[in-house]
Structures are given as structure tokens and as C-alpha cells.
Image: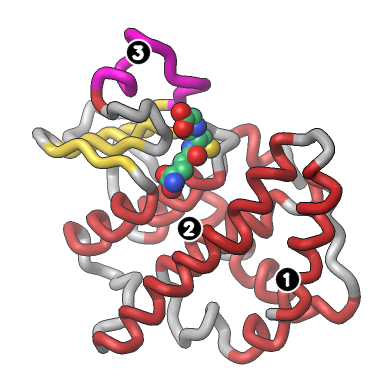
Amino acid sequence: MASVSSKRSVMTLYSNGRCPYSHRVRMVLTEKNITADVVDVETSRPGDDVMDLNPYGSLPTLVDRELTLYESNIIMEYLDERFPHPPLLPVDPVARASARLYRYRVDRDWLRLLDDIQAGGKGSTKARKELVESLTATAPVFGAKPFFMNDDLTLVDCCIAPLLWRLPALGVELPAQARPVREYGERMFAREGFRKSLSDYEKDLV
Ligand SMILES: N[C@@H](CCC(=O)N[C@@H](CS)C(=O)NCC(=O)O)C(=O)O
């Protein structure tokens, strides 16, 4: 990833190149031009750095000096507060709370289905259908503003873009009625910050 420093720096992100939760944090780093060491971890096993740092061994995991954080939403909010420019959450408390709720719903309604699709097996066909239906039903919302329910990029977009990027490779085809979703995706994918956030694996998904 071009904009992420390979030099030893204070902050380290343990990331998996296939993981949509790691991808959203990488996108926050690149959108904000934050310098960090991104360490690619395939899977955490006992004895690995991540297992020593994070009791759940989950990715992404961020280390900033003495602080260790896990859970992508917690990491993204920390980065947004520690590196305030450009802000990726609205200032107004109502809009801020709404953006948090959207992220909760993105995870609960869509990422859960993406996880099921990626897991393969019997549940994946049903999950594919449910995801297409849910995204299609939300299409007018995607078309209403340049970003998801906002005039500027927010953490919500950093969660949605990695999800949409993976759909074609997972055999998820959006119907014609979902055009605003596809157009929203194209706007996100054209961003320099998005392109720089891609791992080698993700670059090959097109
Ligand atoms: N809710 C977590 C989900 C992260 C997650 O599921 N990461 C996967 C990789 S995509 C992982 O680390 N799985 C191994 C594990 O949880 O032990 C987040 O948002 O960070």
C-alpha cells in the first residue's frame, strides 16, 4: 500500500489482507494520510504477536505506543479523534450518533451476511439473496447524497466501501433497481484513499 510507511513508526496496525474489518481501518489510515506500519497477518495462532496483544486474537488490532485496541469500530473512532483532519464523523451530536447507528446496522445487517457468504456452505446462498434484497431496498438512500446519508465522507462509508468491493468476487450481483448502490460504489472506489487502502489480494478482486 503506497501511502502506508514501511519505516518503523510508532503506530502498528495488524491487518489481514482479505478481511473487510481490517480493510475499513486501512481506508481510514489512507483517507487521513496517517503513517502506520501495516503488518499483514494471515491468521492468529497462540504465540503470535496478535495473540499476545489481544485476548481474542482478532484482526484488525492497532498498537499505538502503550495503547492496544481491537474491534474495528473502536479503532476507527480512535484514529478519527487522534488525527482529526479530515474529520470522518459529523460534529453535530445528532448526526454523530446517527453515523454510529448506521455503522452498527451495516455490521448487523450486511457484514454478518458477508461473513456467512465468505464462510461458504449451505447458508451462503440464503445470505447472498438476503444481502442483495437488503442493499436493493436501501438503494434510494445510497442515491440521496454523495456519501452515505452525508455530504462528506464518514466512517460509515469506510465500512460500506470494503463490503461493496468484495461483492462481484463473491458472486453477488446487484439488480438494475440497485443502480444507486453501484454508482455509490464507483464513487468510493475512485477515491485515492480507497485505492491506496487495497491489499494485494483486494487489488485482484476486480
Ligand atoms: N467485530 C470485529 C470482527 C473482526 C473479525 O471478524 N476479524 C476476523 C478476520 S476478517 C478475525 O480476526 N477472525 C479471527 C478471530 O476472530 O479469531 C471487528 O469489527 O473488528
Magenta stretch contains residue 42: yes
Q: Is residue 138 above or below residue 42?
A: below
Query: Mark 2 — residue?
Result: 193
Q: Is residue 182 above or below residue 49?
A: below
Magenta stretch contains residue 118: no
The majority secondary structure of the magenta stretch comes to: loop
Q: Where residue 191 sits in the image (x, y, percent)?
A: 55, 64
Q: Is residue 199 above or below residue 165?
A: above
Q: Is residue 192 visible?
A: no
Who's the residue at 51% across and 84% down the image?
149
Where are the magenta residues, as a range?
A: 40-52
Q: On the image, which quarter does residue 83 sit in? A: bottom left
Q: Say which amino acid is labelled 1.
A: Ser
Q: Are marks 2 and 1 in contact (CB under 8 Å)?
A: no
Earlier in the chain: of badge 3 and badge 1, it is 3
Within 8 Å: ligand 1 and the Cβ of disc 2?
A: no
Q: Say which amino acid is labelled 3.
A: Asp
Query: Mark 1 — residue?
Result: 134
Foreground label between 2 and 1 = 1
Q: Is residue 125 left or right of residue 188?
A: right
Q: Where residue 116 sits in the image (x, y, percent)?
A: 69, 44
Secondary structure category for the residue under label 3: loop
Q: Is residue 6 left or right of residue 80?
A: right
Q: Say which amino acid is labelled 2.
A: Gly
Secondary structure category for the residue under label 2: helix
Query: Mark 3 — residue?
Result: 48
Q: Are marks 2 and 3 in contact (CB under 8 Å)?
A: no
